[in-house]
């Protein structure tokens, strides 16, 4: 795999207090993700509107689904990506600036056992 693609997926549920910091840490990566999805897992109307505003301001994609918990939100994100690799982040957490770079450096080229 010469240039592996990466998608960052953040499950979101009524987390407008934290999501901007999380999103900014993804957008500040030394190697940018190919896709950046935030899955709104059935948040309140007010929280969904706040997320919409933040996503338009920062430029990430929001997917919406009925509430089913973090696991189902992550799975929904995975179902809607075409990237080779997935990196999950919680709405109230953040990445160090070289997180994706470090993850990609651990992928052995042409390793038949890596998957």
Image (cartoon, helix red, strand yellow):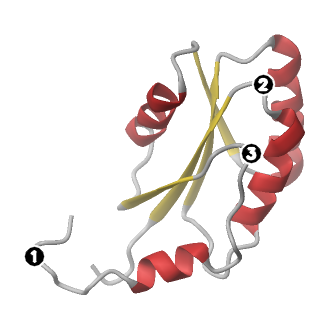
Picture residue at 41% right of the left edge, 57% below the top: 83
Badge 2: few (under 14), some or many (20 or more) residues near its Cα, within 10 Å? some
Mark 2–mark 1 Cα distance, whole angstroms, equals 41 Å
Per the image, label 1 sits on a secondary structure element best described as: loop
Q: Along the line of sight, which residue is nearer the eye, 1 or 106?
A: 106
Ranked by sequence position, the earlier of labels 1 and 3 is: 3
Ranked by sequence position, the earlier of labels 2 and 1 is: 2
Judging by the rendered image, the residue that carries numbered circle 3 is 92
Mark 2–mark 3 Cα distance, whole angstroms, equals 11 Å
Q: Mark 2 touching mark 1, by CB under 8 A? A: no
Mark 1–mark 3 Cα distance, whole angstroms, equals 35 Å
Indicate whether 27 appears above or below 19: below
Q: Position of residue 8 (x, y in %)?
A: 56, 55
Q: Mark 2 touching mark 3, by CB under 8 A? A: no
Picture residue at 62% right of the left edge, 72% below the top: 32
Residue 52 falls in image quadrant: top right
Q: Along the line of sight, which residue is nearer the eye, 29 or 90?
A: 90
Residue 25 falls in image quadrant: bottom right
Badge 1: few (under 14), some or many (20 or more) residues near its Cα, within 10 Å? few
Q: In the rendered view, does 14 fall on the left or right side of 114?
A: right
Picture residue at 57% right of the left edge, 12% below the top: 66
Indicate whether 18 appears above or below 71: below
Rendered-image quadrant of the C terminus: bottom left
Indicate whether 33 appears above or below 12: below
Q: In the rendered view, does 80 fall on the left or right side of 44?
A: left
Q: Nearer the viewer, mark 1 or mark 3?
A: 3
Q: Nearer the viewer, mark 2 or mark 3?
A: 3
Rendered-image quadrant of the N terminus: bottom left
Q: Position of residue 31 (x, y in %)?
A: 60, 79
Judging by the rendered image, the residue that carries numbered circle 1 is 112
Judging by the rendered image, the residue that carries numbered circle 2 is 14
């Amino acid at each position: 795999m010469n240039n592996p693609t990466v998608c960052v997926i953040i499950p979101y549920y009524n987390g407008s207090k934290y999501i901007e910091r999380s999103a900014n840490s993804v957008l500040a990566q030394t190697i940018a993700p190919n896709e950046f999805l935030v899955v709104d897992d059935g948040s309140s109307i007010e929280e969904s509107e706040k997320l919409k505003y933040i996503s338009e301001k920062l430029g990430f994609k929001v997917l919406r689904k009925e509430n089913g918990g973090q696991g189902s939100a992550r799975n929904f994100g995975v179902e809607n990506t075409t990237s080779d690799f997935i990196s999950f982040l919680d709405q109230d957490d953040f990445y160090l600036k070289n997180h994706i770079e470090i993850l990609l450096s651990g992928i052995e080229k042409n390793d038949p056992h890596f998957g």
